[in-house]
Amino acid sequence: MSRAVAEVGRPLRRFAKFTPRGRVTEPSVRCDRDRLIVVQCKRYASDHKVGRPALQQIKTVIADAGAFRGYAVTTASFSAEATTYAASAPGMVLVDMDALLAWHRDGLIVG
């Protein structure tokens, strides 16, 4: 899934570096241009929502990497608690399956 997410950024001339699978202390993908963006991918079944604890780990990765933005991307969705938590985490963007499909259809917009 990380490679599929990185592929979306290719037209934007993003460079993607992948980290070893399953290492939650590092981003799944580090995309560079002018500012660092980290992407952490969660490949879950559609009925398994990403919860707040996973986002807390991702927030730590964002801070440790010194990134200006961090994307939490999942093939599922996010719990209500996770969505509330992310709203209070500067620079964190949640991307669920619907948004991921839109990225592939419309292209990634990094703002």
Image: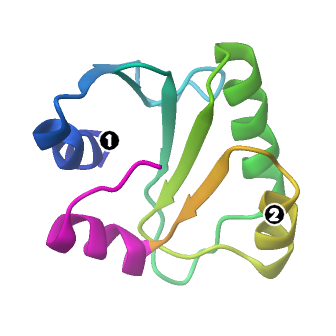
Nearer-the-camera pick, 47 or 4: 4
Q: Amino acid at mark 1?
A: Ser
Gap in angstroms between the C-alphas marked 1 and 2? 23 Å
Quarter of the image for residue 79 reads: bottom right
* SS at circle 1: helix
Image x and y of residue 94, in percent: 59, 62
Compared with 75, 90 (above or below) is: above
Q: Amino acid at mark 2?
A: Ala
Q: For this view, does 107 lie left or right of residue 88?
A: left
Residue positioned 56% across, 76% down in the render: 77
Give neighbour class at mark 2: few <14, some 14-19, many 20+ (Cα, 10 Å): few
Disc 1: which residue: 2
Could you say whether the residue bearing mark 2 is in a helix, strand or loop? Answer: helix
The residue at the point 62 percent across, 24 percent down is 67
Residue 9 in percent (x, y) is at 23, 42
- Residue 101 lies in the magenta-colored region: yes
Of the numbered discs in the image, which one, if any, rests on residue 57?
none
Q: Which mark is residue 87?
A: 2
> Looking at the image, is mark 1 or mark 2 earlier in the sequence?
1
State yes or no: residue 16 in magenta: no
Q: Residue at x 69, y 38 (%)?
A: 58
